[in-house]
Image (spheres, grey):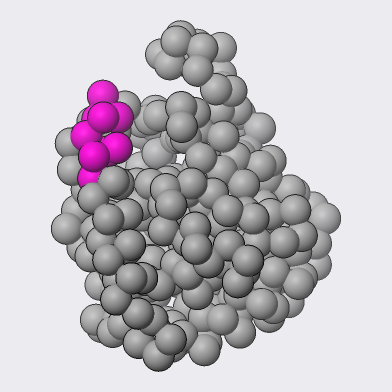
């Protein structure tokens, strides 16, 4: 459920920078360049995203979170490349472009209550927290959940709570959520529990397997699409279909929940 992804073609308040120690000018410049590349790629894929630029708050968060702190030392030199990187246990950290657009699509921001399914190394959760959101995040792999919790705490992201367990069941005792972000692909339909835990007016951002009626939208590129579901006040939903993506499958019913 953690981050082996990329797109099909290629505490409340204002968080502060948390990795001054050990960060050099080269890291800061590399991160700034990464943000420029994200902006260019968003413009290139605007026909799917229905926007030519992302919210300034999201771009500021991408510029603030030290991605090099979330990758193994052996890959630190590539930390600000716009591509997934291995983090061990057969998993990867997401492509920065994907992290940015999913953060933007879910509408993270100050005071927003966000559930993330698929913690991985914790990078996406850190970006959400950097926008001012309060984050609850679930990881199915025990080792990753434990490592992410420790890393996020060390970096000062105390608005993030990590749990190990089956993300498809959500976090019912903390529901409802203003937004739910899933970093693994569901089989055609999102888990019912996640829709139930979405607040009226909330957004669910989730990759799903292509449905036949929508496949031609993307000209056959990739086998998944990023879906945005908005829940109306009366409980009905509106679906928006976005760009082609490639994520690992969502694992359901194979982990017992517990705090990391």
Is 152 left, or right, of 170 in this rendering? Answer: left
Depth check, front residue: 155 or 192: 155
Q: Which residue is drawn at 50% across and 74% down?
A: 69
Q: Can residue 107 be seen in this view?
A: no
Does 44 appear in magenta? yes
Can you give x and y, in whole percent of width and height, for residue 218 in the image? 43, 16
Q: Which residue is drawn at 75% across and 53% down?
A: 90
Depth check, front residue: 82 or 217: 82
Q: Which residue is drawn at 26% across and 29% down?
A: 44
Q: Residue at x 47, y 69 (%)?
A: 68
Locate the C terminus and report the quarter of the image it occupies. Answer: bottom right
97 vs 69: above or below: above
Q: Can residue 143 be seen in this view?
A: yes
7 vs 152: above or below: above
Is 77 left, or right, of 179 in this rendering? Answer: right
Depth check, front residue: 32 or 60: 32
Magenta: predominant secondary structure element?
Answer: helix
Can you give x and y, in whole percent of width and height, for residue 48 in the image? 31, 27
Does 173 appear in magenta? no
Can you give x and y, in whole percent of width and height, for residue 159 in the image? 42, 82
Is 7 left, or right, of 105 in this rendering? Answer: right
Can you give x and y, in whole percent of width and height, for residue 184 in the image? 60, 46
121 vs 192: above or below: below
Magenta stretch?
Answer: 39-47
In terms of image quadrants, where is residue 173? Answer: bottom right
Across the whole image, how many numbered discs are drawn on residues? 0
């Amino acid at each position: 459920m953690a981050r082996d992804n990329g797109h099909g073609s290629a505490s409340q308040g204002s968080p502060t920078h948390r990795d001054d120690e050990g960060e050099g000018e080269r890291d800061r410049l590399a991160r700034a360049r990464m943000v420029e590349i994200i902006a260019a790629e968003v413009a290139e894929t605007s026909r799917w995203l229905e926007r030519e630029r992302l919210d300034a708050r999201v771009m500021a968060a991408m510029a603030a979170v030290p991605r090099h702190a979330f990758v193994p030392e052996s890959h630190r030199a590539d930390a600000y490349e716009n591509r997934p990187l291995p983090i061990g246990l057969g998993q990867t950290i997401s492509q920065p472009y994907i992290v940015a657009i999913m953060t933007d699509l879910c509408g993270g921001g100050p005071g927003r209550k966000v559930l993330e399914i698929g913690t991985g190394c914790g990078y996406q959760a850190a970006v959400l927290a950097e926008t001012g959101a309060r984050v609850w995040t679930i990881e199915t792999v025990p080792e990753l959940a434990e490592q992410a919790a420790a890393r996020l705490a060390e970096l000062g992201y105390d608005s993030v709570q990590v749990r190990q367990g089956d993300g498809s069941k959500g976090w019912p005792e903390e529901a409802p959520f203003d937004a739910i972000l899933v970093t693994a692909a569901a089989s055609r339909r999102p888990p019912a529990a996640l829709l139930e835990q979405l607040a009226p007016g909330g957004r669910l951002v989730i990759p799903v397997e292509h449905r036949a009626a929508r496949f031609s939208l993307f000209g056959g590129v990739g086998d998944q699409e990023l879906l945005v579901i908005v829940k109306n006040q009366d409980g009905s939903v509106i679906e928006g279909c976005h760009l082609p993506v490639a994520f690992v499958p969502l694992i359901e019913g194979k982990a017992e929940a517990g705090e990391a």
